[in-house]
DNA sequence: CTGAAAGCGCTTACAG
DNA sequence: CTGAAAGCGCTTACAG
């Protein structure tokens, strides 16, 4: 059996009460400098560490954030995970990592979060049913959808400026002389893909430019496959806006296998600015998502809500920037 | 304030004692079918959920595994993270994700793990000092080094068969007619890079083949840079074994920029078999790490130790397999 | 500022 | 099989 050092042990050694030991470790409690000193010395000697569970049991709050991810395959997300972990750590919060296989969170996915009474939740790359959403509301657990948003949502979400970004992408492509354009969508039920499509088309319609739409799934393989189908159709556009980078790389690889030159025969632009976009083999022009700022905004909201729950909803859109490389 | 539903509430509604409610949710406790039924019905009505913290407090064990990662940038690791999360979930364990920036775990990295009294720990892509290691031993927290091992370790570690794999890689390269070989090492203080180097050289020495060594850092940029330096030296080998895939991709891109043809002018082989290795742009020959089996072995050991702590140490090496593609 | 005491929501001997 | 009661390691009014 592992012998746990408790506040009682420290109290005994320090010659103070257990309450005093507790006060030393509880932020905001008042203790005299002398008591603190004695306690800290004793604690150090015994290698004391306050039990988070006892703490949480009594305060009914935890220092754990649930982070739910689906698309960890996409190199965009490891970056996001890292940034979140570091940001939360800075504020004393730990990350409970939950992986879901479903586009829509299932109740067994959130079981863990509820059991551990997480202080807040970040949901990345997935949505949830209204019923599941209600569970969080009832438990007053603040929630942020990261890089995705619910329709008619009364939940907070943090995104890149998908729509206006795509408008600028359309304008950029037109300025490069593209005449027939195409959009390759990601998973059709995602707000990101929908918003990007919307912004893109708005500008094309304004300029009365022909365009077509193809559907894929935000994966490399998906991009690769749809590109092959496009080539088979024999009617290639002059420029393609691919809904995210990882798909765009698949498109590039497929097009090159058909001996198409990029950007000469075909211009391609992605979205995200993942690490590989800058690799010499690709040099993909893309739209950079400001991950750091997005994470910052998410953490700030969450921390505020944890501190004082209001449940207010809003969609925060953070401006990204066009990264021009060699595929356009 | 959020009103928490407790076992007491359920007990009242079900007309039984609180202990009986507890027994229904505690695996291994005996309850009559009738009691269980009443309790479950009441619990469902109230949406009751046992408080994990109260539970952990009393049992002094948790259902949380600490997963420490460093190299999340390397596409190999998101895969590992996903597999671990899924495997642990299957056994009722949740994952506390910790990110470290250091090759060697620092005490503030493990603070969280200790505070939450995690049931076990997986450390990926990092090592730790003997002092830190002792802390885990003292607290009888089982630990596995995943894809890395400590020198003179009395800790369990799970790896691919790095050394014998590299022997086979050497043989394979020789069989392909390579005459002057090179090894590009990853971080020099990692067991993986060291073992791969050792196995590779063993065969080359046996066959009295000339070889040279270059040092890099397991990143794409590192591979790209060292390849540029190699070209500047004007004495290229006929085949390079690169210690991992992501570096190998950097090497390929750099070599191609110098108009070198792969595999005609230069053969390249990697290690890991990350997703990108199979992309048409690369078609990298590599050694596949059997992630699934490695994860399985780790989880099995950890679960056994959690159940009955022995602290016994061993290095498990799991056989990978050569994946031949087009760079050799 | 400090200590004694109650209590967070559970598990687990102990009787019955 | 079931209930009453003690106790896990803390926080937090309440007196002093």
Image (spheres, coloured by chain):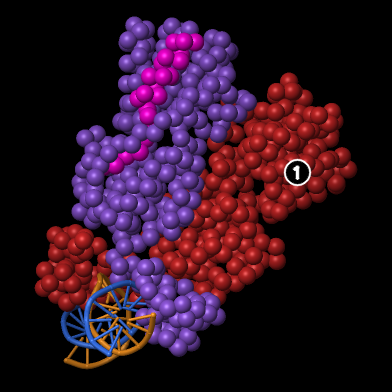
Chain colours: A red, B purple, C blue, D orange
Q: Is residue B225 left or right of residue B157?
A: right
Where is residue B29? Give x, y as percent.
36, 72
- Is residue A56 visible in the rendered structure shown here? no
In reply to whether residue B163 is colored magenta, the answer given is: yes
Q: In the figure, A318 relative to A30: above or below?
A: above
| Front one among B125 and B16 | B16
Where is residue A64? Give x, y as percent.
42, 62
* Residue at 14 percent of width and 75 percent of height: A16
* Residue at 60 percent of width and 46 percent of height: A289
* Residue at 75 percent of width and 43 percent of height: A215
Q: Quadrant of residue B229?
A: top left
In reply to whether residue B50 is colored magenta, the answer given is: no
Where is residue A57? Give x, y as percent.
36, 73
The boundaries of the magenta stretch are B155-176
* Residue at 62 percent of width and 46 percent of height: A320
Chain of the residue where label 1 is placed in the rendered structure: A
Q: Which quadrant: the C terminus of chain A?
A: top right
| Front one among A218 and B229 | A218
- Is residue B285 visible in the rendered structure shown here? yes
Q: In the figure, B288 relative to B125: above or below?
A: above
Most common SS among magenta residues: helix
Which residue in the rendered view is the most extreme toward the right? A208
Where is residue A244? Give x, y as percent.
66, 42
Which residue has dot 1 on it?
Answer: A215
Q: Which quadrant: the N terminus of chain A?
A: bottom left
Q: In the figure, B26 relative to B255: above or below?
A: below
Q: Is residue A89 left or right of residue B251?
A: left
Q: Residues within 10 Å of mark 1 (few under 14, many from 20)?
A: some
- Helix, strand or loop for disc 1: strand
| Front one among A88 and B314 | B314
């Amino acid at each position: 059996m592992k012998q746990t050092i408790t506040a009682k042990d420290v109290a005994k050694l320090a010659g103070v009460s257990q309450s005093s030991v507790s006060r030393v470790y509880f932020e905001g409690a008042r203790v005299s400098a002398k008591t603190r000193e004695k306690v800290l010395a004793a604690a150090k000697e015994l290698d004391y560490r306050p039990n988070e569970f006892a703490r949480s049991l009594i305060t009914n709050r935890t220092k754990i954030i649930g982070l739910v991810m689906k698309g960890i395959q996409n190199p965009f997300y490891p970056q996001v995970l890292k940034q979140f972990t570091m940001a939360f750590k800075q504020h004393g919060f730990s990350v409970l990592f939950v992986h879901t296989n479903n586009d829509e969170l299932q109740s067994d996915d959130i079981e863990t979060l509820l059991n551990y009474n997480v202080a807040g939740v970040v949901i990345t790359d997935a949505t949830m049913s209204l019923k599941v959403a209600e569970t969080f509301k009832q438990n007053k657990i603040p929630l942020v959808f990261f890089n995705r948003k619910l329709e008619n949502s009364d939940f907070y979400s943090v995104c890149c400026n998908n729509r206006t970004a795509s408008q600028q992408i359309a304008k950029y492509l037109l300025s490069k002389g593209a005449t027939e354009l195409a959009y390759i969508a990601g998973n059709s039920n995602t707000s990101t893909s929908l918003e990007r499509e919307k912004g893109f088309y708005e500008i094309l319609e304004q300029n009365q430019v022909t365009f077509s739409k193809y559907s894929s799934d935000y994966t490399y393989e998906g991009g690769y496959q749809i590109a092959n189908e496009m080539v088979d159709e024999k009617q290639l556009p002059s420029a393609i806006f691919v809904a995210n980078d990882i798909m765009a790389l698949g498109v590039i690889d497929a097009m090159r296998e058909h001996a198409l030159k990029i950007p000469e025969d075909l211009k391609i632009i992605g979205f995200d600015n993942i690490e590989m976009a800058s690799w010499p083999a690709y040099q993909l022009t893309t739209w950079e998502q400001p991950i750091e700022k997005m994470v910052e905004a998410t953490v700030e909201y969450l921390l505020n809500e944890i501190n004082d729950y209001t449940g207010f909803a809003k969609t925060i859109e953070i401006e990204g920037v066009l990264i021009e490389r060699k595929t356009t």
